[in-house]
Image (spheres, grey):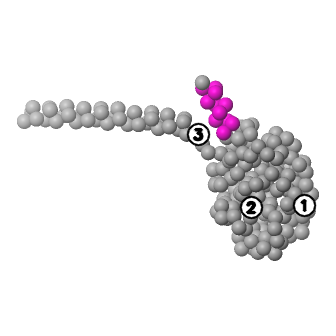
Amino acid sequence: MENILLVSNVILWVLVIGLAVTVFALARQIGVLYERIAPAGALMISQGPAVGDVAPEFELETLDGQRLKLGGIPPSNKSTLLFFLSPNCPVCNTLIPVLKSIKRDESQWLDIVLASDGEVDKQRAFVQRKELAQFPYVLSTELGMTYQVAKLPFAVLIDEQGVLRAKGLTNNREHLESLFEAMERGVASIQEFMSKRQQGVA
C-alpha cells in the first residue's frame, strides 16, 4: 500500500512539474508572438499635408450656422480631432458611439469636428438621426481635397499649436486611439514607433 502511495506521489509531482514547464513555455511563446504582431494603428496616407507640418487654416460654417476656425491656434487651446465621415459609410456609423465616448472622456484636452460633403438636407437628417448635434459639423469639399481624403472614415489630429500630429484611415476604436498614442510618443504613426523600437532592439 505504501509503495502504491509513493508511486502515485512521484507520478503526481512529475505531472505538476511537467505542467509548470508547459505553462512557462506557453507564456514565453505568447511574449514572442506579442513582439512579432505589432498593434494595428491607423493606416497613414502619404498624400496631403505631412505630419509635423502646420495644419492648413480654414474658416468654415457649421451646419447650425456657427463660424469655425480649423488650423492655427484654436480659441479653446485644445487639440482637434477632425473626423471625415459620410451618412452612406457603414464603418463611419459604427464609430459614432466611439466618437461620443472620446468626446465625453477626453474633452479636457480635445475638440472633435466632423467633416463631410454632399447635400445639406441629407446631412442635417443624418445629424438628427445619429444625434450628432454635440459636434461641430462642417460640409467642405475643399477641406477633404486639401487633406487628400480618398477613403472613409479618415481622421486628422491637430495639436493645440495648430501642428498636424497624426492622420490616417480609422476603421475602429483602436485606429482612432493610435492617433492619440502617436502624438503622445512624438511619432507620425504607431507603425513608425514599432519600427524604431524593433531597430533599437536589433
> CA separation, marks 3 and 1?
38 Å
Does 198 appear in magenta?
yes
Mark 2 falls on what kind of element?
loop
The residue segment tinted magenta is: 191-201
Q: Position of residue 34 (x, y in %)?
A: 53, 38
Residues at marks 3 and 2 touching, judged by CB atoms closer than 8 Å: no
The earlier-in-sequence mark between 2 and 1 is 1
Which quarter of the figure has residue 60? Answer: bottom right
Confirm or deny contact between disc 2 and disc 1 (CB under 8 A): no
Q: Which residue is mark 2?
A: 85
Q: Earlier in the sequence, mark 3 or mark 1?
A: 3
Disc 3 to disc 2, how far (Cα)? 27 Å
Which residue lies most toward the top here?
202
What type is the residue that disc 1 sits on? Leu
Q: Residues within 10 Å of mark 2 (few under 14, many from 20)?
A: many
195 horizontally vs 14: left or right: right
- Relative placement, left or right, of 147 versus 201 is right
* Percent of width and height locating residue 112: 78, 57
Q: Secondary structure at mark 1?
A: strand
Q: Which mark is residue 60?
A: 1
Where is 120 relative to 156, above or below? below
Quick check: can you spot residue 114? yes
In depth, the one of 17 and 154 nearer the eye is: 154
Q: Residue at x 30, y 32 (%)?
A: 17
Q: Amino acid at mark 2?
A: Leu
Can you give x and y, in whole percent of width and height, for residue 27 in the image? 43, 36
Mark 3 residue crowding within 10 angstroms, few (<14) / some (14–19) / many (20+): few
* Residue 125, placed above or below residue 9: below
Residue in the foreground of this view, choosing between 82 and 91: 91
The disc placed on residue 38 is: 3
Question: Is 3 left, or right, of 185 in this rendering?
Answer: left
